Amino acid sequence: MLRSAITRSVLVLAFLAAPDALLTAHCRAADWTQFRGPGGGGVSDDQDVPVKWSSTENVRWKAALPGRGLSSPVVADGRVYVTACTGWQQNRLHVLCFDEKTGKQLWERQFWATGLTGSHPKTNMAAPTPVTDGKFVFALFSTCDVVCLDRDGDLQWYRSLTGDYPTITNQVGMAASPVLAGDTLVMPIENAGESFALGLDKATGKNRWKIERDRQINWTTPLVMTNNGKIEVVLQSPKELTAVDPATGAKRWSYEAKGIASIPSAVAGQGALFLPAGEFTALKPRSDGASPEVLWNSIRLKPATASPILYKDRVYSLNGGGILVCADAANGNVLWQERVKGPFSASPVIANGKLYAVAEEGVTTVVQLGDKPLTLATNEVKPAADKDLLLATPAIAGGAIFLRSDGWLWCIGAKKEQ
């Protein structure tokens, strides 16, 4: 059984490209460093994202990917990171880095999977989105292999979580993404086998804490939020929300309810937390350890797979029928709804008052938000093959929107000077 102590040289198959000169690494305010970007909210401050494009128009660059992946690209300090999987039964795991301006591949690292590789045909082993602080990138795969690489691709540490916890299962494909809370890397490993959340020291990969979770399949990504001046990590499961201290894992508060979503993740802002569920719920967390106050519920905002977005006092939800619903964040009253072309696996994102909804078949609908919705464009990119769908949530950074399929990574935006 492979253990965490496996050396770097055993698992690293190839350092395929020499990194360029070492630069001072840091995240810019406009970077997109995790699943759904800053704070996991799906909103960018970028003012220059294109509204219209095609497979040839407004394409800054396009890069081929070696294999399948549902993970979103993440962008930090001029570099774009993405994961993929190839090989027999998806047992070869890839982390790739591209130059944000040109699309040049700067490096690629490969690892053997040590965990189970079975999954539903629609998903794969490169489903979780990596997270970066600009200096390091942390990639979790559905096989429960975790790697930490620096921005130049040098391996810092590696863990085989199935080596440490052999009863973890991967029946239909795990997809929850890791997040950073300060110097703690939070890993959601919820499944039908040994189920838990881990807080790892991001510098070493060693456990800081481990919390047992219900043994059930769950794809939601943890939410890092501020509650009364304190950072909390909110873990979402079908029966309960649990807020913990990111440094120790100690429980701060919990909220129990039936029918909490197991795919779309919660979003926080304006002193509230918005929870996708059978009855979409707005909660106000307390500071005394008591359960949050329920502000309102709505059955009209129930999403499918897409996570909701909070933007300028309004909350947006995209349901399975391709209906985009806008509601007042203060009371849940529905203000308008608009049909957009689906179906959708990706969550929508917002930049400069415009919502971008990426459908599986490669069509992105751009909706101008306001008192009434206005569809500005429906933009299509041609995937590499008929089955090469766009299932990943896009990223926004540097005046561009990044789309990924199994075969390609597109940077949609005006070309930049070299």
Image (tube, rainbow, N blue to C red):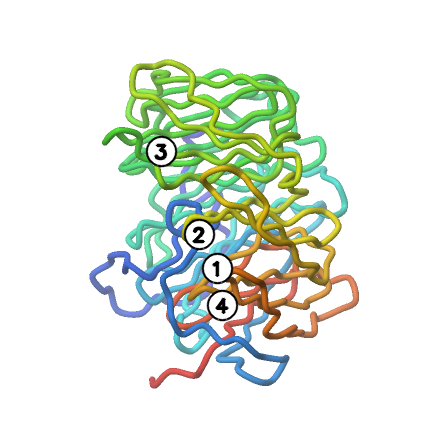
Q: Residue 55: image x %, image y %? A: 63, 80
- The Cα atoms of the two marked residues, 1 and 4, are separated by 10 Å
- Which quadrant holds residue 405? bottom right
Assess whether mark 2 and mark 3 are in contact (beta carbons under 8 angstroms): no
Give amino acid for label 1.
Ile
Give amino acid for label 3.
Gly
Q: Mark 2 points at which residue?
A: 311
Residue in the picture at 53% in, 67% down? 368
Q: In this view, does 53 lie to the left or right of 89?
A: left
Q: Name the residue under label 4.
A: 401
Residue in the picture at 34% in, 66% down? 19
For the residues carrying marks 2 and 1, which lies nearer the camera in this image? 2
Q: Is residue 291 left or right of residue 362?
A: left
- The Cα atoms of the two marked residues, 2 and 1, are separated by 8 Å
Assess whether mark 1 and mark 2 are in contact (beta carbons under 8 angstroms): yes
Tell me which label, 3 or 1, sits earlier in the chain.
Answer: 3
Specify few, some or many for label 3: CA neighbours under 10 Å numbering under 14, 14-19, or 20 or more.
Answer: many
Quadrant of the image containing the C terminus: bottom left
Q: Mark 1 points at which residue?
A: 350
Q: Residue 205 carries which label?
A: 3
